[in-house]
Amino acid sequence: MECYASFNNNFAQATLSPTNTEITRVSTTIGQIPRARKPNINLDLQQALPQDFLITTQMPFSSGKREISLISPSTKAQQIYTINLPNASFQLYGIKFQNLAVIDESKLTEKNRIILDTTKPENIENFQVAFQNNKLSKVVLSDGNQGEFTDTQAIIKSPDGKIIETIDFPQANRTKETLIATIKPILLTSSNCNQNVSSKLGNIADIVGGKGNKLSSSETQITRNIGLALAATSAGLKNNINSRQSLSIASCERAVQCNEKRVNGASEIRSDLFEIPRGANRKVTLEYEFFDILDTIKLYLDGKIIHSDGPKSERHQKTLPLPDNAEYVGVQLIGNWNPETRWWYVISCSESAIANVPCGDDEIQVSYDEKSKKYHSYGVVNKVCSLNTQGCNIDFVFRVMVSNKQFVAPNHESQEKVEHCQTTDLDILGPWGIDTIRTTINQDEYSITNYTRKNHVLYPGQITRTIVEKNGKIYVLTLGEGTGRHPDLNEWLSGRVWGGVDKKLIKKVEEMLSRKIYSLPE
């Protein structure tokens, strides 16, 4: 009896054969020799990344793109997504990851922890990902190594551009990616915008994650590092779906419009886009109030902060010119950590906005919060003359009042005539420098209004002096209000201060009437 074995096509075949006797040969297949296969990898980092990312800034660019920045307060990690502006189909152009140093390995499976141990996680602390037509196109790590991606493969390169490895992708992944890229564009103004953007982000995340899994199985460490970066990108995209502080929500949120007040009582960071109306030589007027607790506001455009104010309290106003090609401005409101904080802002636009600001002066304030601890108001009234005195009438007394600055403001020795929109420098409450006011004249109402400017010790505030007729007599009525310093002192001294100004006016009226001067030139 002879025994022999043959190995063909990865099969082992054993045969027993007699030496001298002719019998039928019996063949038995023992089995297929197993090949060494790489295990399937599913590198899921979604729960291992920080879970407390918050949207902090929206930076619009005149190019039609915007950057949406998210920060993790607990780890200081940052994600910056570049997408389209509103009123366009959703496009993801790129993502920057910064300080992404903390990966919670307790949230990983044992297999994923082993994979993580074979890479260099420090290389994904800072990296960038680029997309074209919502398809992955490039990844650049902090050490300069990079991956360039097409529909069919990934080309891994060193910082000097040398090809390290080429990875081919399965046909199934290529088909799905092509389908996602060619899907009908989604306008961000549509009613189902959030659902559609979330779906697209989820599909992009799945495709990126699949490619990351493929690269993570490579025997080349640089390729595995890029695979880990793609896994982090996939996790970041998935975490940006449907949560209140997510990319899908921010992408679909309607921009703030002209004269639309935004109010929020929470101690939070609020980020909005403000839509600038079309036209040339545009200006917007930003008005905001922080009440008694300190808050901060910032405006962003084309990579720059174009206005920043705070932390401060009270009410403020600022007029800003904007480029003709700008479509949006980013607004960031940083609320105080005090849960009692309150704030609001409103942006007025161009002609209507500037018209509503007296004399176009962005330093003056025209309304005041009556709930502020510094709010104060007062009224002072004094009789000027009687109608039974020849020449005594509203028009005459008003013309006398605006004939001399001494009759419209305290502590002023000038003999100049009052002019509409003029500024006057006063010295109020001692040696603290110049206190400037802006004066407007309302001929129809027989009144003037003085607004304090920012260098005034009692800013912000205003007084209105009106000539009125009642019961056969002419009076001068002074009404004041504001939220500036020394509210109690303002009210307590109002009678003495404005009574002194009234005495000068009354004396001049009596002097002119006694001299039978009944009119003044306009």
Image: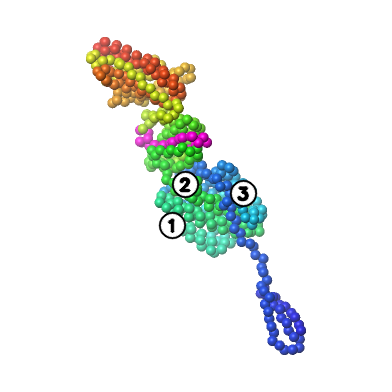
Classify 10 Å Cα crowding around label 2: few (below 14), some (14-19), many (20 and above): many
Q: Which of the 4 quarters of the picture holds residue 98? A: top right
Whether residue 229 can be seen here: no
Q: Nearer the viewer, residue 221 or 429?
A: 429
The x, y position of residue 515, in whole percent, is: 26, 10
The x, y position of residue 253, in whole percent, is: 44, 46
Q: Which mark is residue 250?
A: 2
Residue 437 drawn above or below residue 334: above
Q: Nearer the viewer, residue 127 or 116?
A: 116
Classify 10 Å Cα crowding around label 3: few (below 14), some (14-19), many (20 and above): few
Kind of residue at disc 2: Ala
Instruction: Find out whether residue 109 is within the magenta segment.
Output: no
Q: Which of the 4 quarters of the picture holds residue 277? A: top left
Residue corresponding to mark 3: 104
Disc 1 to disc 3: CB gap under 8 Å: no
The x, y position of residue 367, in whole percent, is: 39, 30
Q: Residue at x 48, y 38 (%)?
A: 266
SS label for mark 3: loop
Kind of residue at disc 3: Asp
Which one is earlier in the sequence, the residue at label 1 or at label 2? 1
